[in-house]
Image (cartoon, rainbow, N blue to C red):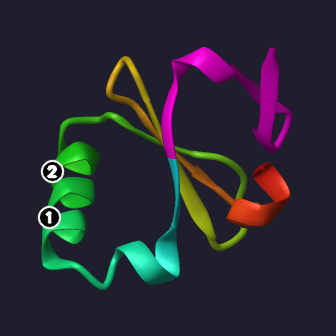
Amino acid sequence: MYLHIGENKVLLKKEIVGIFDLDFSTVSVNTRNYLNSAQKEGRVITLGFNLPKSFILTRDDKIYLSPLNVQAIK
């Protein structure tokens, strides 16, 4: 089954490790450091031009920044 994560992007549900709210999860220094290092390594994919509200981590260690909130994705 596929899951729409915003901006005409869909992922297989079995490939998704987690869906996280950016406002709540980036309070932690560890999460911010992880996202920064992933950005430097080129593993972060930004969907659209709007401010991202959530991020999706996949099994292949890619991170998708989505303009949709967690509730909309679920």
* Picture coordinates of residue 2, whole percent (x, y): 80, 20
Residues at discs 1 and 2 in contact (Cβ within 8 Å): yes
Regarding mark 2 in the picture, which secondary structure is present there? helix
Is residue 54 or residue 47 the one in the foreground? Answer: 54
Residue plotted at (13% across, 68% down): 30
Residue plotted at (67% across, 22% down): 13
Residue plotted at (81% across, 14% down): 1
* Picture coordinates of residue 58, whole percent (x, y): 45, 28
Residue plotted at (39% across, 73% down): 25
Disc 1 residue type?
Asn
**From the viewer's perspective, is 28 left or right of 55?**
left
Which residue does the numbered mark 1 point to in the structure image?
33
Which residue does the numbered mark 2 point to in the structure image?
37
How many badges with numbers are in the image?
Answer: 2
State the extent of the magenta-drawn residues as a range.
Answer: 1-18
**From the viewer's perspective, is 52 left or right of 69?**
left
User: What is the CA distance from the residue labelled 1 to the residue labelled 2?
Assistant: 6 Å
* Picture coordinates of residue 36, whole percent (x, y): 21, 59
**From the viewer's perspective, is 19 left or right of 61?**
right
Disc 2 residue type?
Ser
Q: Confirm whether the magenta stretch covers residue 13.
A: yes
